[in-house]
Amino acid sequence: MLSRIGEALYGMGRDIERAQNVVRVLEVTHKMALVRQSLEDPLTWLPLYSSFDVAIDEPGEAELYERLVVDPQHPYSVSRCLREAREKGRSLRDHISEEMWAYLNRAYLGLLGLSFDAIRRDGRSEFSFRIETLCDAFHGIADDTMMHGSEWRFLRTGKYMERAEMTARILHVKGQSLAVMPDAAGRPIDVHQWQAMLRSLAGFEPYRRWYDARILPGRVLEFVLRHPDFPRSLGYCIRRVDEHLPEESRGPKQAELREALGGLRRHLDATDVDSLIRRDLSAYSEDLMSRVGDLSSALETACFRNFYRVTAQSMSEQSRFPVNQ
Amino acid sequence: MGVSELPRIPRQAATRPPPFDGYARASGTARAETERLVHVFNRRGPEGLAALQREAEISLLNQGITFTVYADERGTEKILPFDVVPRVISGIEWAALESGIEQRLRAIQRFLADLYGEQRILRDGVIPSDLVVNSPFFCREMVGVAPRGDVWVNIAGVDLIQDETGGFMVLEDNLRVPSGVSYVLENRRVMGRILPDVLQRARVRSVEHYPQMLFDALRSMGGSEDCRVAVLTPGIYNSAYFEHSFLAAEMGVDLVEGQDLLVDQDVLYAKTISGLERIDVLYRRVDDDFLDPLVFRSDSLLGVPGIMHAVRAGNLSLANAPGTGVVDDKAMYAYLPRVIEYYLGEKPQLAQVPTYLCREEKSRATVLANLGDLVVKPTDGSGGYGILIGPHASDEEIARMRADIEARPERFVAQPLISLSTLPTIVSDDGDAHLEPRHVDLRPFAVTGADGAMRLLPGGLTRVALRKGTVVVNSSQGGGTKDTWVLHDGEDFMNAE
């Protein structure tokens, strides 16, 4: 398989996963702000700015929706992600199923002309539900209509790699909240934020079922970092990345990739969640984000840029052009 | 499809004999080979015809046989208009065409080998040297290179027209990157879906084996059984991208872009998830100019730096070889009959449109004396720019052209107006439909492998000018296509009924 094709499939998996996560975070933050009656409070929204690389201009919900949903260029924008996925789909039509293309194309066309005003008018929850199901449905269609060969595996790898990065990022949002309100620990708002984090990972219900209704920071961290069956825990995502990587792509750089995977897993295992909540969560989550980022670079290099670059003059005498006649 | 390659055809003069019609004699009665077919369509009546046409269009749309309309933010894709009334060519007629095209291409292969080799034909003064060396399509980098089997043109899409007597004439050779063959296959598939019984009774020769034929020819250029073939496309935004991806998929080879390839030590490689993999034969659907930024246009992002070195080192076959465009020139076209005689010692079997070279004194005098009756074309022009259609031109335009020819005669050729033949075509108005004659041309596809033996696909792209009275078959200007039925040799059409 051409590296470009592998990378496009991987990228498509990432685009769809990213759109879904961003929408969920926005919706959860909005709901939290409603409960706290702090819709206009910039503090509610600020942690999202740094975690999702949004430049602060007029801090508030409108600006975040503008950048993270409507903006055609912002790397985390839902519009951009879905447009990109559809563009990739178009060039991948010989590699994905007809059902996937048809679905993606319709979904994309249905989202043209998106605006914050329209989302506000029709309801944020409605919008969030629509995008979340769209993304879930896409992966479902892929699973049931594609051959489960290398193409499908790259799509999956991209999905779980993005999810791992997103989980680290969403943890960082909470880290940022604690950093801007250092005295909040243990107060209702703190509990509320931990709960919001779980919701942002679609993990509140699973958490409650696994433990109980009490939100204890140590448990929450254990759950999102290491739980082997929670589909958005970092440990789970990394295991899935490892499982889905196509065998044939493990070329010359495979040792580096293996080291990166093992290194991240060891780092998670070694994390002492109980001491973490007393220490600087923001610093930990920032470091975690960069570790996950390193893993994804190692993966992309190993799978899609595993050929050496031709730098030196690489033409022989034999092939020289004739002098003008 | 590659709209830019479609020829401009002179418009029809009012005073000429009526065009040849593929179905009806001048007397109005149907020709023998199409009589039953006319009956089939007439029996359906206006509503039936309209329904048939709709069915064909839906079938094409559902199959995704579309070309993308640029700058349309909704990404709308449109089908190339398709007309269900086929062109019918008898076995005998086809055999003559096949033999004529074979002869022409045999001479062209020898011609190209000579131009990039000894240049005997120039030294013998048969072709003026400046026509070759000053041609923008002459590729210096191919001098001294011999493609396997000295086969330069692996795929040709020769454009043919029929004059007022029904005789076929070559209009253009299309030796660079001819497109349209995917429509030949898809049109046939659509006909098989909507008129299966008619198609079967008519005993039409199959076109389904084209990808196999193409693959065999390409692989033969690599020289070994296990050589690796790929199709090079400019990318998804190219108007012929559908065809590139169609052919790659049908041949079971990779569809690559410039960014997927690199050259190291004069060998071409594809970047794959398991590392670099060598490519031996590249069916490139990218023009010469864009192939190698080291050699041709340095701003090209479509090509591969160093690819021409791989060709020169004998490590890579490009199909077609670079530099074949030198024969596609409008002035060179005029010399083709002499080229055939020079290399083969044979008279050309296929006619071509008589072409006056203004660079030759006698011809120039004829042209200048008859400007009002001729079509004058600049030799380096394309897309119809700078063409003078004498019978439709004003005195002023003719005077200006006269001055231009006198100033730089070598830049111009002139041809008589040919009235393009017609075929009945479904014309809809308000849900009803009936048949009317529309002008057509024909592009059959010839494939040649390293053994030098040409194989002509029995069929071809019949392009039709859908707008009444026009002869522009260009898809961007209301042109459409028809299926082309070549009948089995010696079969009476639809005899089995």
Image: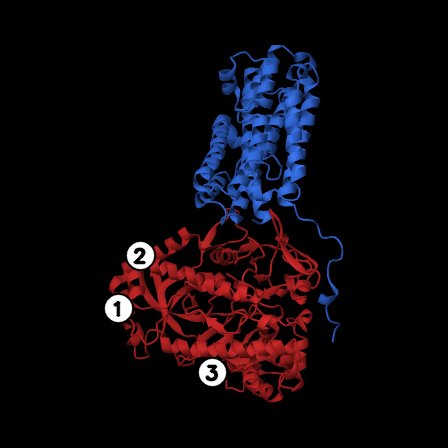
Chain colours: A blue, B red
**Disc 2 sits on a residue from what chain?**
B
Disc nearest the viewer among 3 and 2: 3
Measure the alpha-carbon separation of dots 3 and 1.
34 Å
As drawn, the label of residue B39 is 1
Going by the numbered disc 2, the residue's amino acid type is: Ala
Nearer to us in this view, B34 or A202: A202
Q: What element carries label 1?
A: helix
Q: In this view, does B397 lie above or below B292?
A: below
Q: Is mark 3 on a helix, strand or loop?
A: loop
In percent of width and height, residue B230 lies at 56, 58
Going by the numbered disc 3, the residue's amino acid type is: Gln
Q: Is mark 2 on a helix, strand or loop?
A: helix
Measure the alpha-carbon separation of dots 1 and 2.
17 Å
The lab-note entry on whether marks 3 and 2 share a chain reads yes
Q: For mark 2, what is the residue?
A: B51
Nearer to us in this view, B207 or B76: B207
Nearer to us in this view, A87 or A49: A87
Residue B221 at least partly seen: yes
Q: For mark 3, what is the residue?
A: B349
The mark that comes first in sequence, 1 or 2, is: 1
Nearer to us in this view, B75 or A91: A91
